[in-house]
Amino acid sequence: MAFEYELMHILLLLAFSTCCFSSIHTSTTTASLGTSKSKPHRLVSKLIHHRSVLHPHYNPKETAKDRMKLDIQHSVARLAYLRARIDNGSLISNDYRASLSPSLTSRTILANLSIGQPPTPQLVIMDTGSARFWVMCTPCLNCVHHSLPIFDPSKSSTYFAPCRTPCGFSGCKCDLSDRFTFNVNYADGSSSSGTLGRDMLVFETADEGTVLVPYIEFGCGHQIRYNKDPGYNGILGLNSGPVSLVSQIGRRFSYCIGSLTDKNYNYNQLILGEGADLEGYSTPLQEHRGFYYITMEGISVGEKRLDLAPTTFEMKEDGTGGVIIDTGTTMTYLVDDAYKLLYREVRNILRQSLKETTFENIPWQICYLGDVSRDLVRFPVVTFHFDEGADLALDPGSLFEQVTDNAFCMVVGPISEFGLGSIPSIIGLSAQQSYNVGYDLENGFLYFQRIDCELLSG
Ligand SMILES: *[C@@H]1O[C@H](CO)[C@@H](O)[C@H](O)[C@H]1NC(C)=O
Ligand SMILES: *[C@@H]1O[C@H](CO)[C@@H](O)[C@H](O)[C@H]1NC(C)=O
């Protein structure tokens, strides 16, 4: 029996190891099988933001104020992590040793991916700042209170993990039971360790068929260390480290973030591989220390271009400066010179009409009494300009956020306030709302397309 099992996997292996990426499309209708030859199948996964009713930690009692406090805490943890990464030099190769700090990661966005046969849905953190893809697996030490179903490799007919299969990263060690081990340790003391396995990913298509992507390597975590139920099954690292899913699946991906605040919004989505949406304006993309950097050239508020020195966002030789596009933080943090001018301009515009207020006595946070959707109708669009003419336009809903029923704050802050020294500026998820963002790692370009994500579904 064991032999048959092995044989089947070897056959699978032979069938799919010839190319970096293959997919099988199964559908109840032959029509869609027919079209499957001409168009790449879209590997689409819904994204669930932390305020969504679908999020495992959705709390109807959580107030806007609680949310903002947690968002700020989470952003601070992310910045500290970034600082540590810069201090430790290139961590792409070291990804299994240090990754994002999961203690507050339930504030990030989750992708719903299915693994195995029969397919088991897994909610994993979408993280453009790490490489490893891992999920919790049974038997699991310390997953007792976990609220989501844990992946059981012994129940998936397509799971396999012997050392004979090639191992995608340099630190592979074969243990006594013929398994490659993996181990990720996080800055906050939590960790995940287990075996490296391979199984298929299963995506649903718009016409209710499925696309199977076999032979995907991922970490099967049997020993998890964390304090409380993290509200996710694992982490989907999307940088281009040799082991990452994007490297296995076609070096392209795109995500569309329509809204991060509407609890019922259900069109945020991630597309992996060939079918990724690379549309709109593009700007050169580079990867350093496992983060995605783009070249920012300036900021406009309405028609007015802020008077920033050309070197403001320049990347320095010591690894400081530069601008990262990130999915691990909701807020945006700008180098102080840029923040100050933006802050001044926003105050000038709102001085006449709204009354300033503070939030939790955070000195840099600029807040007003009022309502984002009611009082900012005529507020100008703030545009971040990038190399080669790509723009990211932030309307008031992407620049400000309601913190109480009658107060809102700007969700852009200065990086100096965190006592972390000089770190790169970070464009967080809030600023990416209303956009489809496409990553073409093969050619080194990032695409920004302003679009209603609902139009991309289907
Ligand atoms: C994840 O996807 C599965 C399969 O489509 C679905 O049954 C499940 O409800 C989804 N989970 C969430 C939280 O959206
Ligand atoms: C950075 O390196 C030091 C020394 O090697 C190590 O103790 C620390 O945990 C590392 N930090 C991260 C975030 O990897």
Image (spheres, helix red, strand yellow):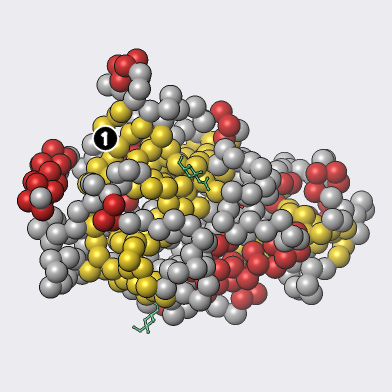
Q: Residue at x 55, y 42 (%)?
A: 268
Observer-nearest of 305 and 196: 196
Query: Which image quarter has ligand 2?
Result: bottom left
The answer to whether the residue bearing label 1 lies less than 8 angstroms from the nearest atom of ligand 1 is: no
Q: SS of the residue at dot 1?
A: loop
Q: Which residue is drawn at 58% across and 53% down?
A: 55
Q: How crowded is mark 1: few (under 14 residues within 10 Å), some or many (20 or more)?
A: some
Observer-nearest of 263 and 99: 263
Observer-nearest of 172 and 386: 172
> From the viewer's perspective, is residue 391 above or below residue 57?
above
**Can residue 442 be seen?**
no
Q: What residue type is labelled 1?
A: Ser
Q: Which percent across, then down, holds residue 173?
A: 16, 70
> From the viewer's perspective, is residue 147 above or below residue 111?
below
* Residue bearing the label numbered 1: 23
Q: Which percent across, then down, holds residue 362?
A: 75, 73
Q: How many marks?
A: 1
Q: Which percent across, then down, holds residue 437?
A: 50, 42
Q: Which percent across, then down, holds residue 138?
A: 34, 63
Quarter of image, res 402: bottom right
Q: Which residue is drawn at 27% across and 21% down?
A: 37
Q: Residue at x 42, y 47 (%)?
A: 121
The reply, left or right, for residue 92 in relation to residue 298 is left
The reply, left or right, for residue 146 in relation to residue 4 is right
**Can residue 69 be seen?**
yes
